Structures are given as structure tokens and as C-alpha cells.
Image (tube, rainbow, N blue to C red):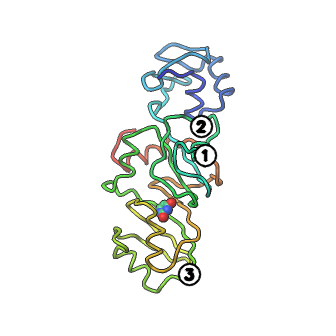
Amino acid sequence: MEERLDRVLAHLGLGTRKEVGKLIRAGAVRVDGAVVRDRGFKLDPQRARIELHGEPLAFARHYHVLLHKPAGVVTATRSEHEPTVLDLLPNALWRDDLRPVGRLDKPTEGLLLLTTDGELLHRLTHPRWKVAKVYLAELEAPLPPDARERFAAGIAGFAPAELEVLAPQRARVTLREGKHRQVRRMFATLGTPVVYLRRERFGPLTLEGLAPGEARPLFEGELTALYEAVELEP
Ligand code: URA
């Protein structure tokens, strides 16, 4: 699908449409070897080779956004009645082919990756690659003394998980699978239902620097680590 050059560059996180427009007018951008000074120039970002100041833009084929999902928003691309995670993205980051990687329940906060790369999404959510997901949970009741051992043995039919008890009613849990409402179901089995849940980490990605509701493109180092974690080339 063809898109405007300024929109493609803004999507890659190089600045607002206005900022990238200045770069284009200044002659800093080449498409397929030729300088393009028209910010409305149409190109297919999947195929075109784009250079900025003579450097090819890496990862132009796909696009990824890190979102700190707040509570009260559904992990879906469309909903008639409720705000979705895509609705939260500012225009400069939004793209209609972005898909959430896994899902966080409506009341759950925390790290949610969105990507246009279907193969990356498949691998990150497939149990074979065992990508670690770390959650912080606040609980309605104190944890039983054997909670750690029961998580390690595999609770409620789920794969073994690591539990770090931070306080009687507060714990950090690391999963390497991602079944529907898994963390809530695990703690409910212990008789300590979850009252607050936040995903702090997803594979190599953390929430550092992102307040609830904020989003940003991935940094190059994050992107490389993410693809490496599932044995793909970026
Ligand atoms: N486990 C849950 O119970 N909820 C989430 O949102 C994510 C993992």
C-alpha cells in the first residue's frame, strides 16, 4: 500500500509530520537512491529503500510501538463501545495495521507491544519461544507460605512460574506462556485474588520512561533484542 513519505517517516519515529517535512525539504531523504524533496511523495514502505543523511533506515519494513496500557482500555483493534489500545496512540504513531502482541485484560495495566510484523507477533506469543512476561500483582489476601513452591510446581494446570514474594499481599510473577487471564486464575487458585495487575516486562522490553497512556516507537537496541529472542532477523 502506498503512503506519503512524511507519514512513513513519522511512523518510523523520526519526528512529527512537520519535523520530518523539514528534513525532506532540506534534501536529507533519498528514496530508491534519489533525493526526494516532496513530503507528499507516495511510496510503498514495504518495498522502498529509504535513506536519511545517506544511512539506510533499518527496519522500514515493519513498525512497532511500545504502549503503557492504562486500566479501563480493551486490548483490541476495534470496539463499538469501549476505548481500545489503538485509540490511545497519537496520530504520529498510529497505523491501521498495528496489532497487539498478546492481550492484557481491561483492568490490567502495563507493557503492551504493538507490531505490524505478523511473524514476530506469532513467535512472541507462541509457547515454543518461552518469552518471559513479568507481572506485579497486588492481592486481596496474604499469600500462603507455600505460594512460591506451588507456582514453581505449576499451579492450576499452568506451566511452572517464578513467584517473588515482595510483601504478604504483593508479588512479582514471571510466566513463559500467556493463557487467558492466567495470572488472575493462578492467584485465585491460591485463594488470593488479584486486585491490581501490571505487566512490567515483556522479553527484553521494560516500561522504563513510559507513564500510563504513553507510547513510543522501539529503540533500535530493543528491536534487535526482541527479534533475537525469537530467532528472527530484524
Ligand atoms: N494474566 C492476567 O490474568 N491478565 C492479564 O491481563 C495478563 C495476564
Q: Amino acid at mark 3?
A: Ala
Separation (CA) of disc 2 from disc 1? 8 Å
95 relative to 84, above or below: above
Separation (CA) of disc 2 from disc 3? 40 Å
Residue that carries the numbered disc 2 in the rendered image: 93
Q: Nearer the viewer, residue 139 or 54?
A: 139
Which residue sits at x=50%, y=44%? 114
Q: How many marks?
A: 3
129 relative to 134, above or below: above
CB under 8 Å between discs 2 and 1 = yes
CB under 8 Å between discs 2 and 3 = no
Badge 3 local density, few (<14 within 10 Å), some, or many (20+)?
some
For mark 3, give the secondary structure: loop
Disc 3 C-beta below 8 A from ligand 1: no
Q: Amino acid at mark 2?
A: Leu
Q: Amino acid at mark 1?
A: Ala
For mark 1, give the secondary structure: strand
Residue that carries the numbered disc 3 in the rendered image: 141
Q: Is residue 158 left or right of residue 218?
A: left
Separation (CA) of disc 1 from disc 3? 33 Å
Residue that carries the numbered disc 1 in the rendered image: 215
Q: Nearer the viewer, residue 84 or 158?
A: 84
Q: Is residue 229 left or right of residue 165?
A: left
24 relative to 90, above or below: above
